[in-house]
Amino acid sequence: SYTEFSYQLLQGYDFFHLYKNLNCTLQMGASDQWGNITTGTELIRRLGGPDDKAYALTGQLITKADGTKYGKSETGTVWLDPALTSPYQFYQFFLRAEDADAPRLIRVFTLLSQAEIEALEAEHALNPGLKTLQKALAKDVTIRVHSETAYKIAVATSEVLFGGGDPKTLDEATLVGMCSSIPHLRVPRAEAETQSVAVLLSETTDKKILPSRGEVRKLIQANGLSVNGEKLTSPETPVAELPTLHGKYLVIKKGKSFFLLELTA
């Protein structure tokens, strides 16, 4: 198709543009990108002068057990920049690796020794549900790409969102870090504290949590709504009586969904 034909030309010209405008001299990719990258180095050589040089570096193509690759088209782009892929999302990407893929990924992406990996594999085989291999993989890569602090925030966030962890145990930095993975809503404190829970979680938050006061009542009656880890028992509970986290946050859990509600000055 024309798309397949033009892709190599477009990627080659993209390299030329980066070279001329941003002094980018190296393009890296998996082995399947060799032809696309060298198109760029050749274009730079032909359109530039005798001193214009650029380089290509490719590595092993990482594939899943079924043969499909870990590309942005198949699994979504995973960025190293925390502004584009948060440390929590980065950690979760590796934690969600299939059992069939984890042994290869931990050998490719971590700096663990063969003996350490084999010990982890033996432990994982005893109870695959504990995801021993995936946790070790996600921990190693997250710490090296981001930091140990970022890793701890990712684990704490995962425990609250998926493991029934108590949000009251999170420090403010970790709590705010959750915003990358759940909706973060802001409401003026002066307005919120004059209202009931039913109003706050429907009209005041522009129906982003629940569409009506009636839906709030139904969910509370079904024992499906909690604030900061505590089940709500009445839709008429005054917001002013709700204990906040770090003086201004309410972690709302609706079924399996979470919202971070911040009471602003």
Image (tube, rainbow, N blue to C red):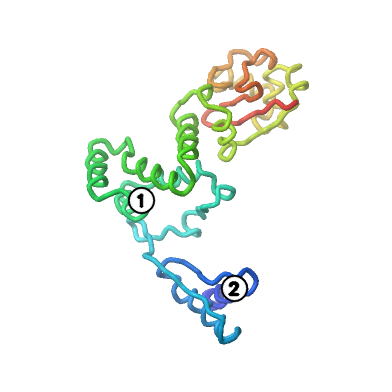
| Residue 34 vs residue 113, the one in the foreground | 113
Task: Please give left or right for residue 124 compared with residue 261 in the image.
Answer: left
Q: Position of residue 31 (x, y in %)?
A: 40, 69
**Residue under numbered circle 2:** 19
Q: Identify the residue shown where x is 65% and y is 28%.
A: 261
Answer whether labels 1 and 2 touch (C-beta < 8 Å): no
Badge 2 density bin: few <14, some 14–19, many ≥20, Cα 10 Å = many
- Which residue is drawn at the image coordinates 67% and 22% (left, top)? 214
Which residue position is annotated with label 1? 110
| Dot placed on the residue nearer the N-terminal end, 1 or 2 | 2
Disc 2 marks which amino acid? Tyr
- Label 2: element kind: helix
Q: Residue furthest front?
A: 51
| 60 and 164: which is toward the camera | 60
| Above or below, 197 relative to 208 | above
Rate crowding at label 1 as few (under 14), some (14 to 19) or many (20 or more) other CA atoms within 10 Å.
Answer: some
Q: For numbered disc 1, what is the local secondary structure?
A: loop
Q: Quadrant of residue 238?
A: top right
Residue type at mark 1? Thr
Q: Is residue 126 left or right of residue 223?
A: left
Residue drawn at (64%, 30%) of the image: 209
Marking on residue 124: none
Image mark count:
2
28 relative to 198 in the view: left or right: left
- Residue 145 is situated, as x and y percent measured from the top left of the image, at 46, 49
Q: Position of residue 192 (x, y in %)?
A: 73, 21
Residue 243: % across, % down: 62, 16
Q: Quadrant of the C terminus?
A: top right
